[in-house]
């Protein structure tokens, strides 16, 4: 998103596509994105590379539209370097619920009426109950129903953020799953490590989920533990033995239900858990639940 919609000047010309967004909100978007275009689900495949697609209010859609959206999120977004943004006022028990983990961002206005939707989104991503209550209080105090103030959940970095005056303008990270600090002195290293990791998983179907997990790790574990060349991590075992394990292998194994998990990967999992809270939604291999 940093290379497309977020924080870019109007003159950069990045395109924004809107699906099911009303005329009033479309006019607001157009102030920052002159090349904005409203399309329907059947036109998703025509969206250009490095564009952003905002999908709003998909409470009731046809099977055909749902399939076209799934194709866009799972295939097109990857091959065209696109970002998909969900802007729904109702999440739970709708056709969009099962797709939440594949969007890049989920956005909300500052309306207090969005509290139930926020809870549903946070629960989907397995945010702890204590964190949810803190985040809801932040939402209420910072937003307070103000116009043009948006909140968004970044599904890749697992962070809760807000922007004022316009979507993704004057943005600020409010909190991150597991309590990681995005304002640390290591932020430059974290971003660099995430870019390297993205290259390793570029062609994998689980790329979005893998990047999300690695982002959590990179923001919790001291980057000095991680070798940039191969993203291996060095740590000391309980017996005092120095271990070197690939974080790429670890993340992919965690997200692959039938992957064979060797003891070193279990060891790194225990090590990472000392610093990070990996949401249960990402622990798909039962070997890591032990």
Image: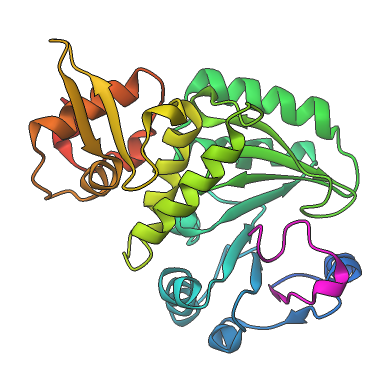
Give the camera-side residue of 76 and 40.
76
Quarter of the image with the C terminus is top left
Q: What stretch is highlighted in magenta?
A: 1-18
**Residue 288, located in which quarter of the rendered image?**
top left
Q: Is residue 5 above or below residue 127?
A: below
Residue 23 visible (yes or no): no
Give the camera-side residue of 89 and 163.
163
- Residue beneath the point at 86% across and 77% down: 34
Looking at the image, what colour scheme do you see?
Answer: rainbow
Residue 229 percent location from the top left of the image: 35, 47
Residue 95 visible (yes or no): yes
Q: Is residue 161 left or right of residue 273?
A: right
- Residue beneath the point at 88% across and 68% down: 24
Residue 8: say if magenta.
yes
- Residue beneath the point at 68% across and 83% down: 39
**Residue 2, located in which quarter of the rendered image?**
bottom right
What secondary structure is the magenta-colored segment mainly? loop
How many circles with numbers are drawn on the protein? 0
- Residue beneath the point at 17% across and 29% down: 266
Name the outermost residue toward the top.
Answer: 239
Name the outermost residue toward the front.
Answer: 229
Residue 273 percent location from the top left of the image: 33, 22
Give the camera-side residue of 75 and 189.
189
Q: Is residue 228 above or below residue 63?
A: above
Quarter of the image with the N terminus is bottom right
Residue 202: say if magenta.
no
Q: In this view, does 245 lie to the left or right of 34?
A: left
């Amino acid at each position: 998103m940093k290379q497309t919609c977020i924080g870019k000047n109007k003159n950069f010309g990045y395109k924004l596509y809107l699906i099911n967004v009303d005329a009033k909100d479309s006019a607001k978007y157009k102030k920052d994105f002159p090349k904005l275009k409203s399309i329907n689900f059947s036109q998703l495949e025509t969206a250009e590379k490095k564009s952003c697609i905002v999908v709003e209010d998909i409470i009731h859609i046809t099977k055909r539209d749902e399939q076209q959206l799934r194709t866009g999120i799972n295939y097109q977004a990857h091959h065209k370097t696109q970002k998909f943004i969900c802007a729904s006022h109702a999440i739970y028990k709708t056709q969009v619920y099962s797709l939440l983990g594949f969007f890049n961002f989920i956005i909300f206005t500052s309306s207090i009426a969005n509290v139930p939707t926020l809870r549903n989104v946070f629960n989907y991503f397995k945010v702890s109950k204590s964190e949810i209550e803190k985040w809801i209080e932040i939402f209420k105090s910072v937003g307070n129903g103000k116009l043009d103030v948006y909140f968004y959940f970044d599904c890749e970095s697992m962070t809760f953020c807000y922007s004022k005056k316009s979507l993704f303008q004057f943005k600020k990270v409010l909190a991150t799953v597991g309590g990681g600090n995005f304002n640390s002195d290591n932020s430059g290293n974290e971003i660099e490590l995430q870019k390297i990791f993205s290259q390793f998983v570029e062609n994998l179907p689980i790329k979005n989920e893998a990047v999300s997990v690695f982002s959590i790790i990179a923001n919790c574990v001291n980057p000095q533990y991680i070798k940039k060349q191969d993203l291996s991590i060095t740590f000391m075992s309980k017996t005092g033995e120095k271990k070197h394990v690939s974080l790429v292998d670890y993340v992919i194994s965690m997200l692959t239900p039938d992957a064979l998990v060797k003891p070193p990967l279990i060891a790194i999992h225990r090590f990472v858990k000392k610093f990070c809270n990996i949401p249960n939604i990402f622990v798909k291999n039962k070997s890591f639940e032990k």
